[in-house]
Amino acid sequence: MRPYRLPLVLLLSSLAVAGCGGGEPEGADTPQETLTRLAAFVADDQGEDACNLMSPAAQELFARENEMSTCAQAVNLFHGKITDADLYRKMVPSGLKTEGTQAEISGYCNEGWSLPEGEAPSETPNDLGTLTLSRTEQGWLVHDYRSSRRYSSCGG
């Protein structure tokens, strides 16, 4: 191997690793803000940023529960279902329940997310499922996840 090839191979390997992995999880100061950022990242198809709002275990669950190999692929799956990204980005976690250092929002029966005016259009982050957050040193992070595929009928 020529001497200049080894540093080039190492450089390319480092760039490949940097481009594939997510950064360190970093949440917001409130669970509402973490969820609002998550919805915006899904609307904008920013999988790595969305996944950085989740603990590593939640990232794995999010991917597995949505039958994808990675968290970012699962974000892309949800992004692909959005027809109005601006509307999706405006959604607020109206059904968020917070108790101490834990918070949870469930899209079950389309009751977790709504527009600030209180309406709930058909296309919302409710499809994301149930997200459980914890306050950590890195801010509020999603630490547990249950896919909306597990929801039973709402009785309609």
Image (cartoon, grey):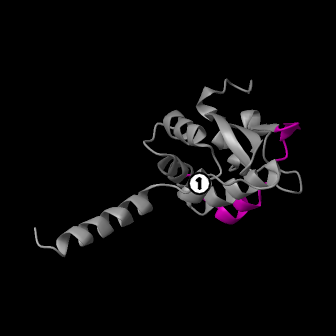
> In the image, residue 39 lies at what x, y percent?
68, 55
Quarter in which the N terminus is drawn: bottom left
The span shown in magenta is 81-101
View extreme (bottom): residue:
4
Callout 1: few (<14), some (14-19), or many (20+) C-alpha neighbours within 10 Å?
A: few
Q: Amino acid at mark 1?
A: Glu
23 to 4, vertically: above or below: above
The relative height of residue 143 versus residue 71 in the rendered view (above or below) is above
- Name the quarter where the C terminus is drawn: top right
Q: Nearer the viewer, residue 84 or 23?
A: 23
Q: Is residue 11 above or below residue 106?
A: below
Q: Is residue 16 left or right of residue 26?
A: left
Task: Tell me which residue sits at (79%, 41%) in the image.
Answer: 112
| Residue at the image position 51 percent from the left and 53 percent from the top | 76
Judged left or right of residue 98, residue 113 is left
Q: Which residue is mark 1?
A: 24
Considering every residue shown, the one lying at the far front of the view is 3
Closest to the observer, 31 or 2? 2
- Does 57 sit left or right of 7 as displayed? right
